[in-house]
């Protein structure tokens, strides 16, 4: 997952609104959004190479999502980052206990940003500064740097989300995630991957022959606990592969 914008409004009739793109190599085997047969109440896509996931919902209002931190010089982790989301969704630990456990072994993973939530709270944890942060009400975004790092695509996606918050609809969230425009060279971050790659990765929606946006997810959580979750899947050059829609 490489881009997540979200509104956290705990007293609102729709306390959590999420729009997210997962960017990955097209060759990496993936299962689309579905209920996990071994974990009733868990709905997520699945990375079939390592078994984890990038975004999903679980029983008792659980929500979790993950992005990687872009740093070509970081060591490979001994464990897959996708398990951080999967273990929380499938487990029963409180968020505070789970985050304390993750902090204690964060060096086992390559860089990550982790979001965990339920009906009462939403937390953010970065591997760069592993101190859990309970988020106040607001609109946030995270890509492949720290929370709210002002990369052009993150600022653009956050602004598009804010414009929809009076009446958020999955169709509008999915539309903001399909923006293919790249940022001007002068506005690109320097994360050590070279100018051509920085440009490719600077769009909200990424499309190329081998790497790009594999899944776009729109999630609306209602105050009564019901959730509307839609995922679109994509292949090389951004070709649309399918849609899954859940109301749970």
Image: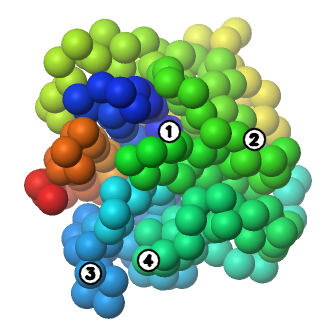
Q: Tag 3, which secondary structure?
A: loop
Viewer-nearest residue: 213 or 124: 124
Asked whether the viewer can see residue 173, the reply is no
> Left or right: where does residue 172 sit relative to residue 204?
left
Above or below, 77 relative to 236: below
Q: Single out the mark in the foreground, 2 or 3.
A: 3
- In the rendered view, tell whether residue 24 sits above or below residue 218: below
Which of the pair 95/82 is nearer the observer? 95
- State how far apart marks 2 and 1 are (Cα): 18 Å
Rendering coords of residue 29 (x, y %):
40, 75
Counting residues from the start of the chain, the first of labels 4 and 2 encountered is: 4
Pick whichever of labels 3 and 1 is earlier in the sequence. 1
Q: Marks 3 and 2: in contact by CB < 8 Å?
A: no
Left or right of residue 89: residue 215: left
Q: Nearer the viewer, residue 230 or 137?
A: 137
- Labelled disc at residue 214: none
Distance between the Cα atoms at labels 2 and 3? 40 Å
The residue that mark 3 highlights is 40
Q: CA distance from mark 4 to mark 3?
A: 8 Å
Label 1 Cα crowd, 10 Å radius (few <14 / some 14-19 / many 20+): many
Residue depth check, mark 4 versus mark 2: number of the one nearer the observer: 4
Q: Is residue 57 above or below residue 80?
A: above
Where is mark 1, residue-wise?
3
């Amino acid at each position: 997952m490489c881009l997540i914008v979200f509104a956290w409004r705990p007293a609102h009739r729709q306390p959590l609104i999420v729009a997210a793109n997962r960017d990955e190599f097209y060759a990496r085997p993936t299962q689309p959004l579905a209920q996990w047969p071994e974990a009733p109440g868990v709905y997520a896509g699945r990375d079939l190479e390592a078994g984890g996931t990038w975004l999903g919902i679980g029983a008792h209002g659980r929500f979790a999502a993950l992005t990687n931190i872009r740093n070509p010089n970081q060591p490979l982790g001994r464990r897959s980052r996708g398990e951080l989301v999967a273990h929380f969704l499938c487990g029963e630990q409180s968020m505070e206990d789970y985050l304390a456990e993750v902090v204690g072994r964060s060096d086992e993973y390559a860089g990550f940003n982790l979001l965990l939530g339920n009906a009462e709270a939403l937390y953010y944890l970065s591997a760069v500064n592993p101190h859990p942060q309970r988020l106040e009400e607001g609109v946030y975004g995270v890509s492949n740097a720290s929370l709210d790092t002002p990369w052009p695509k993150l600022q653009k996606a956050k602004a598009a989300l804010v414009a929809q918050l009076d009446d958020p609809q999955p169709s509008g969230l999915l539309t903001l995630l399909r923006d293919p425009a790249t940022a001007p060279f002068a506005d690109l971050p320097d994360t050590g991957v070279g100018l051509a790659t920085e440009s490719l990765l600077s769009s909200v929606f990424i499309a190329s022959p081998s790497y790009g946006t594999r899944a776009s997810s729109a999630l609306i959580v209602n105050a009564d606990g019901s959730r509307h979750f839609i995922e679109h899947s994509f292949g090389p050059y951004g070709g649309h592969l399918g849609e899954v829609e859940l109301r749970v």
